[in-house]
Image: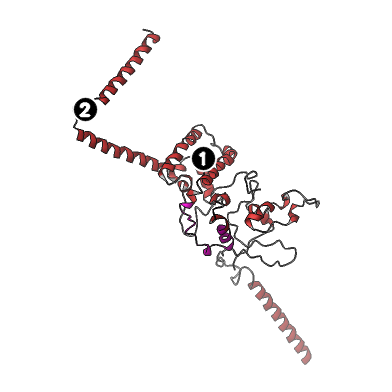
Amino acid sequence: MKRRIAILALSALVALGGGSALLAQTQSGLRGTTPLDQEGPAARMTPTRNTTEREVRNYPEQPPLIPHSIDGYQVDLNGNKCLSCHARARTGESQAPMISITHFMDRDGQFLASVSPRRFFCTQCHVPQHEV
Amino acid sequence: MTASESAPAARGGVLSFARDLWDTLRRPSSVFALGVLVLGGFVAGVVFWGAFNTALEVTNTEKFCTSCHEMRENVFEELKTTIHFSNRSGVRATCPDCHVPHNWTDKIARKMQASKEVWGKIFGTIDTREKFLEHRLELALHEWARMKANDSLECRNCHSAESMDITKQSPRAADTHQRLLFTGQKTCIDCHKGIAHKLPDMRNVPGWQ
């Protein structure tokens, strides 16, 4: 009997602990500690990290992060502001890293003379970071 | 009396009027004193000059530029999203700050060029969005050529290289300005295209893809 009570108490403790852990997890989410039926204060907008220093990749295939601000950069059918520095022919003057040669490859693995259309829109994969 | 008979008479009338006017103008005045004439000329000069300059300045405002839908609905809309319209300190550039030289002689030269734009307005060269987009490259090329030729004078009215504190710039900007701007290899517009309006098709523009 004593043993059964001990087991019950233990399992109740575990259940409680798990519950509070779950609660803590919910609270650490994006909405913070604001109750579900209320709207919390909006987070402040933070400036772009603008160091120009390469960020460590979190896994080998991660598209390199953009270590500078790209406010107002136009990337569309008319032009690509990123490529005005990062294109092969522009890197001498800009001293920016050249886009990877994989970006010249089409989906069949054939190398093209210039950037493959499927790689043209830089911010589909490469993003700047904000100071948080 | 037929039309062919009246025409020489009319021409004679105009000619004789012009001759009379010329005779009056070249003869010394017998009614007004020299002082009155000189002072009157001076006052009239001030009035006309003032009026001319005021009219010139009226055409040199953003309100005047955006009174035409061509400017209001295309380039002005685009300017609104850029840092030259809204920024942390609230200092902003209006159309003439960048598009009209501040120096008087250059300003008059630009204003005379702008008579071509009046022609364009009258004949509706860019009176639809489609026509504007069609002409965007040509219009942009004119502005780039002008800024390249005068060493980005209009940029430098506010952004002086001498007053630039590169320690306050991002490392990337500081390095590039030191290498290319301060050495005079490049001028502002060489790198800063499309900062106030959207870019045209950049395929054959040097430095672009």
Residue B48 location (% of width, % of height):
32, 37
Residue A38, picture quadrant? bottom right
Q: What chain does badge 2 belong to? A: B
| Amino acid at pointer 1 | Glu
Residue B155: in sight, yes or no? yes
Residue nearest the viewer, comparing B208 with A127 = B208
**In the depicted structure, whether residue B207 falls above or below residue B7:** below
Q: Secondary structure at mark 2?
A: loop
In the displayed structure image, the side of residue A79 where residue B119 appears, left or right: left
Q: Earlier in the sequence, mark 2 or mark 1?
A: 2
Which contiguous range is marked in magenta?
Answer: B156-178
Q: Name the residue rendered at 28%, 36% in the picture.
A: B44
Q: Is residue B162 above or below residue B97?
A: below
Where A42 falls versus B21 (above or below)?
A: below
Front residue (pair B114, A70): B114
For mark 1, give the secondary structure.
Answer: helix
Chain letter behind tag 1: B
Q: Position of residue B73 (x, y in %)?
A: 52, 43
| Quadrant of the image occupied by residue B64 | top left
Which residue is the site of mark 1? B70
User: Could you say where residue A47 lies in the image, as x and y percent from the top left?
Assistant: 56, 64
Decide if residue B35 is on the left or right side of residue A85. Answer: left
Residue A114 falls left or right of residue B151: right
Q: Is residue B74 visible?
A: no
List the residue tagged with mark 2: B29
Pick whichever, B46 or B86, lies toward us. Answer: B46
Circle 1 Cα neighbour tier, 10 Å, few/some/many (<14 / 14–19 / ≥20) = some
